[in-house]
Image: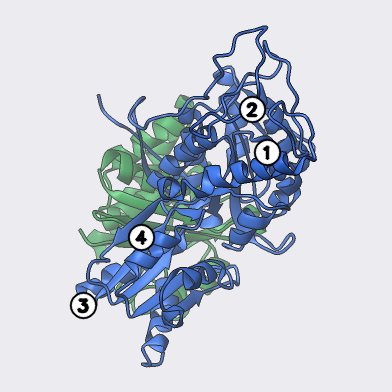
Chain colours: A green, B blue
Amino acid sequence: MERCRMVFSGSGGQGVITAAIILAEAAVLYEDLIAVQSQSYGPEARGGSTRTDVIIADSEIYFPKVTQPNVLVCLTQEAYNKFHPIIRPGGSLITDTRFVKTERRVDARQIELAMFQAVMESIGKPIVFNICMLGAVIAITGLVRPESIIRVLETRIPPSFLEMNQKALDLGITIAQNLGSQS
Amino acid sequence: MSKTIKFIQGNEVCVEAALYAGLNFFAGYPITPSTEIAELLSFRLPQIGGRFIQMEDEIASMCAIIGASLTGSKVMTATSGPGFSLMQEALGYAVMAEIPSVIVNVQRGGPSTGLPTHVSQGDVNQARWGTHGDHAIITLTASNHQDVFAMTVEAFNLAETYRTPVILLFDEVVGHMRERVVIPDKGEQPLVDRLRTAVKSGVDYHPYLPREDGRLPMSDFGGVHRYNVTGLAHDMWGFPSGNPQVVHGLMRHLIDKIQSNAAEIARIREFFLEDADCILISYGSSARSSLHVVQNRRKRGERIGLLELQSLWPFPARIVREKCRHAQTIVVVEMNMGQVLEQVKLAVEQPERVFLANRMDGVFINPTDIRNILRLIQGRGI
C-alpha cells in the first residue's frame, strides 16, 4: 500500500484528535498495519485550532509528523486557512460545508461534504460529528474497514452510545460514496 | 497465546513497562509532558495493591521514593525539566545512600519553565551533573515505544543490580506520540529482583559493606535489622565518617560500581554502519528523524548509517570510537546546543570530523533540517 499521511484539523472539542486515535488504533489492532499518531498540545487543544497527524503504512514509520498530507481534513475556517497550503499535490482536502468556505484553489481534490448538516438532521447530536467525518475518510481512502472502527469504538464508549456512533459512521460513508457516484 | 498489542502514548508504555518490572510505589507531582505517567499510575497502582502518592512537589516526590525503596519497594517518579531540577538534591542522596530508584524525565524546552508543551533534549548534562559532588549515574533513553518498554524495564533492573538511581531521559515527542507496542509475556524480558541480605535477625548486618563482587545486599528498612542511612560520607555501618581512608573507599566504590561496568550498561542500536562514510549519531525522538534520512539516502546508494544511543551515561565512548573509526563525517543529531556532540568529540580519534545537526527552538527536528545540514557539511549548500 501507499503510505498515507493525514492531518485532521478543527477546533478543540470537535473530536478531531479522538477521531485520529480511533482510526490509527483500528489500523494497528485490526488491520495489521503500522500507524503513528501525534497531536498539537497546549491551550489550542482546549478551544483554539487543533491539529493531529496520523501516518498509516505497511512498513516502519520513523519520522512521526506529517509535513505534506495526502489527506487533509479541515473542520473550521480557521483550520482551513491555516493548513490548506500544506496539502500534498494530488491529495484530498476534505472540508465541511457548514464551517468552511473554500476560497483559493489548491492542486488537490477538494471534497466539500455536508457532514455536520447530515448529523444534525438525522441524529441531532453534534457529538458524533467526528465519527461521521471518520466514515467519510475511510470511504474516500479505503484505509480501514468500518468494522475495525466499530471494534475500537466498542472498547472506548458506553454500549448505549454505540448505535448512535454506528449511525454517524454509516452516514459519513454514505455521504462520501454519493459524492463518488455524482462525479 | 496471542500477543498483547497496544496502541498507546510513550508515557503509557513507560507505565506498562514499570508495572511489568514490578513497580509498586510511585510518588510524583504531575507536570507536562510527563503527566500521563502519574495519571495512569494513580489508577493502576491501587489495583495491584501498590501505592500512588501525589506529593506537594518534586523535592518531596524524590524523597518519598527513596524512603519507599529502602523498605523494599520498586519505586519510580516522573517529571520534566523544572521538576527534575528540584529533584537533584535528593537524587544525590540516592546516589550516596545507594537507593535503587527510577526517575523519568520527559524533556521539554528549558531553561526554567521554558516551553511546557514542546520538545527538547536539553537535560542530557543535567542528568549527568545535575546533583553536586563527584558521582557516577546511569541514564537510558529510547526513540520508539518498543524500546521505551525495554529501557524502562532495564532501568529497574540496573537500579537493583547497581543499587543506584537510574534516569530515564525521554522527550515530549516520544512521550506523547502513539504507536504500536507489543507487551512481552511474563518472563520474556528478564527482571532483576532486589538482592537481600542473608544475615539473620539478631546478627550484625553491615548495610554498606560491599561483597567481593561489589554488590551490597539490602535489608528492608523497618524489618529485622536496625541500621543507619545518611547522605553524609559513611562507614560500612552507615554511620557518618570523616576518616579519609573510609571516604576514599566509599567514593571509589560509588564510582567504580558503575564506571567499571560501563560496557555492560552500554546500550545502542546500529543501522548500516558497516560501510558508512557518514555516520549520524542520535538518541530519543531525533533518532527517528535521523533514521528517516538514512533509509531514504541508502535507497540512493549513499553510504550513510545511524548509531542510536540508548544509554547516555556512562557515555558509551568506546563503542562510539570503534563504530566511527572509518567514518569520514560524523554528525550528531540532537535538540540542544551539542551536549552529546561534546562527548562524541571526546570519544573519537578525529574530533574535527564531528558536526552538529540540531534544533533548539521547540520544533521537532525533521528530516529536511538534517538533509540541509548534511548538504552544508558536504559543501553542496542548501
Give the Cα separation between the discs numbered 4 and 3: 18 Å
Against B128, residue B265 (above or below) is: above
Q: Are marks 2 and 4 on the same chain?
A: no
Q: Which mark is residue A62?
A: 4
Q: Earlier in the sequence, mark 2 or mark 1?
A: 2
Residue type at mark 3: give it: Arg
The chain ID associated with circle 2 is B
Which of the 4 quarters of the picture holds residue B42? top right
Q: Which residue is mark 1?
A: B94
Give the Cα separation between the discs numbered 1 and 3: 50 Å
Nearer the observer, B101 or B49 = B101
The chain ID associated with circle 1 is B
| In the image, farthest residue toward the front | B245
Nearer the observer, A73 or B239 = B239
Report helix, strand or loop for mark 1.
Answer: helix
Q: Which mark is residue B69?
A: 2
Q: Nearer the viewer, mark 4 or mark 1?
A: 1
Q: Earlier in the sequence, mark 1 or mark 3?
A: 1
Give the Cα separation between the discs numbered 3 and 2: 52 Å
Give the Cα separation between the discs numbered 2 and 4: 37 Å
Q: Which residue is mark 3?
A: B300
Q: Which mark is residue A71?
A: none
Q: Nearer the viewer, mark 3 or mark 2?
A: 2
For disc 1, the neighbor class at 10 Å (few under 14, some 14 to 19, many from 20) is many
The residue at 73%/53% (across/down) is: B132
Circle 2/circle 1 CB separation < 8 Å: yes
